[in-house]
Amino acid sequence: MEEAELEASLLEKAQAGDREAFWELAAPSVDPIYRLARRLMKTEEDAEDVVQESFLKALDKIGEFQGKSRFNTWLHRIAVNQGLMKMRKRRSDVFSLDAPIKGENGDGKAMDPIDFSESALDELQSREAAGVLETALEDLPIDLRTIVVMRDINRLSNDEVAQALELPLGAVKWRLHRARSILRDRLGEYFAERIGT
């Protein structure tokens, strides 16, 4: 059975109430939706909540899916909406002075001492560069960050991003260009400092 036929068959079964068909249909989207949520949210816990809420919402609303876009695109739209709703709820985050200081792996334990051997230094620089990229992504306005994650990380087409975000194709292309320019500038500054130019 061809992939499109299989998706259509699973969708029909899912809309008829078959949960196994829904999860089989949704399974390939779990990792891309998690990556999207992780980039939108500040904590891993919030990202996991967004993923769970997104799939539960999709399961609940599967009967309303009309097939005007791909199923994966529809799931991305739900995840973006869930993430935005969670961010609105969290705008008044309170910082606790009693909260433990988290180590590198977020477990509340102190970080291990740094090994400055050649390979460890290379790994540290690689982690530092990844951290700079992560920070640059987090610093993007949410509308630009969402498009970069959907397009460049989750590999959706411009058309799919436009459908998922309900934006004109031209707006998606412009925002993607703008986001990439900002990232290029920020990363260029970081690497210029490292190279000494």
Image (cartoon, rainbow, N blue to C red):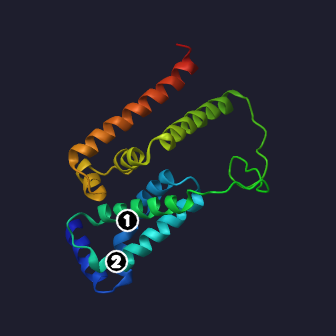
- Mark 2 in CB contact with mark 1 (< 8 angstroms): yes
Q: Could you tell me the amino acid type at mark 2?
A: Lys
Q: Is residue 157 above or below residue 16?
A: above
**On the picture, is 121 further left or further right than 53?**
right
Q: Secondary structure at mark 2?
A: helix
- Residue at image mark 1: 78
Within 10 Å of the Cα at label 2, are there few (<14), some (14-19), or many (20+) other Cα atoms? few
Res 145 → quadrant: top left
- Residue at image mark 2: 61
* Residue 29 placement (x, y as % from top left): 38, 63
Q: Is residue 118 above or below residue 87?
A: above
Q: Is residue 169 visible?
A: yes
* Residue 163 placement (x, y as % from top left): 25, 57
Of residues 181 and 152, the one drawn nearer to the viewer in this rendering: 181
Residue at 53% over, 41% down = 134
Q: Could you tell me the amino acid type at mark 1?
A: Ile
Residue most extreme to the front? 92
Of residues 144 and 95, the one drawn nearer to the viewer in this rendering: 95
Residue most extreme to the bottom? 17
Residue at 44% over, 27% down = 185
**On the picture, is 95 further left or further right than 29?**
right
Marking on residue 134: none
Of residues 151 and 78, the one drawn nearer to the viewer in this rendering: 78
Report how far apart the C-alphas of labels 2 and 1 lie in the structure.
Answer: 10 Å
Q: Is residue 2 visible?
A: no
Q: Secondary structure at mark 1?
A: helix
* Residue 39 placement (x, y as % from top left): 48, 50
Q: Earlier in the sequence, mark 2 or mark 1?
A: 2
Q: Is residue 22 above or below residue 131?
A: below
